[in-house]
Amino acid sequence: MPLNKSELFDMLADALEGRSFKKIKVGLTVCGSEHPPEVLIGAAKEAARSLDGVSVVLIGGGEAEGQGIQWVKAGSLEEAHRIMEQMLDSGELDAAVTMHYNFPVGVSTVGRVVTPARGKPLLIATTTGTSATDRVTAMLKNAVYGIIVAKALGIENPRLGILNVDGSRQVERLLKRLSENGYEINFARSLRPDGGCIMRGNDLLAGSCDIMVTDTLTGNILVKVLSAYTTGGDYEALGWGYGPGIGEGYGRIILILSRASGAPVVEGAIRYAVELVKGNLLEIASEEFEKLKSAGLYEIVEELKKAEKTEEKSKVEPPPQKPVTAEIAGIDVLQMEEAVKTLWKNGIYAESGMGCTGPVVLVSPEDLKVAVDLLKAEGYL
């Protein structure tokens, strides 16, 4: 692409001030927002003005030039995405910020928000895209994606918490297995009295961890709420947006905005992109996936697939019914019925239920010890 007036001006300014000519270039598509293009263009100008050594390339919309700003014509968001991808793949862009973008399965985004109680940044893993079609596998990968982004942001030993949603207990056990296999994970501790790395809503508000792992749909809602709770919902005014798409072998740095993202979030997303470029996101991702391979991530994923198929085929009849008053807590809600059937197979009558702290398996008091030992041996506890 030939240099425009803005680039020539920037190069001259750099030369006069003794700076390197090499700039980080971040693309921003300006089509598809619920806000006027001027909102995005204004945010891009502010980012370019305040970020040293950064050039913003506007793709689509009306022409806008100035120091640190370039413009590439595009008649639609689809055309803007094609141009964006071509520029990323050719090296004309180092990263891009866009909306309405479809990632392949296996890639999802790590959002970044400001926690209301402490005003500190928190990564939400993940917020758009699909890491895997199985919920537990997806959340397991989400945790990994969050660690990759945190390290690219310069957080060397990020504290990881798992939001208390369906699948969280199973994900906790699998992550601890990865940790035991040599993949370093620094588990956060809840601020609630019972502690542990399973995070409650209080932890979300206070930012008890650096990375909050959850399913993508929940993560998407969290970003929307935490970005727009001060504005009534139609204008996201806080945070850095929905973040970069992460996945094994994925070679582009593309960050996502929502149609409701306002100027502060657009500018934040551009800054987020610059941090990730400077932090060598793609190289870190490659290194982390190699470590995960050694720690047995792919074997764990295959085991989850086999377990799912086995569960679909198995039909187990319960033993004779008896009164059940003893509770066994700590089993993931997604595994409750599977755990109950495991006890049935071993001649112990059990039922699933809901206790004051979450889902429980109910057994008779005389079967409690044997039931707990069995569930531990089978990996449910």
Image (cartoon, rainbow, N blue to C red):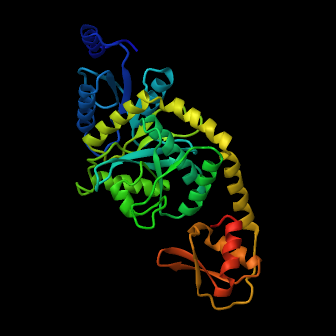
Q: Disc count in the image?
A: 0
Q: Percent from the top left, x then y, of residue 203?
A: 38, 59
Quarter of the picture containing the N terminus is top left
Q: Quadrant of residue 75?
A: top left
Q: Nearer the viewer, residue 1 or 231?
A: 231
User: Left or right: where does residue 364 sit relative to residue 110?
Assistant: right
At 41% from the left edge and 67% from the top edge, which residue is drawn?
Answer: 193
The reply, left or right, for residue 190 in relation to residue 262 is: right
Q: Position of residue 316 (x, y in %)?
A: 75, 77
| Visible residue check, residue 163 | yes
Residue 369's place in the image compared with 282, above or below, is below
| In the depicted structure, whether residue 131 falls above or below residue 254 | below
- Residue at the spot 31% in from the left edge and 45% down from the top edge: 239
Image spot of residue 201 (x, y percent): 38, 63
234 up-or-down from 33: above or below: below
Name the residue: 24% across, 8% down: 16
Q: Residue at x 27, y 13 (%)?
A: 5
- Residue closer to the observer: 358 or 156: 156
The percent coordinates of residue 325 (x first, y second) are 59, 87
Res. 126 visible in picture = no
Tell me: 52 left or right of 308. left
Quarter of the C terminus within the rendering:
bottom right
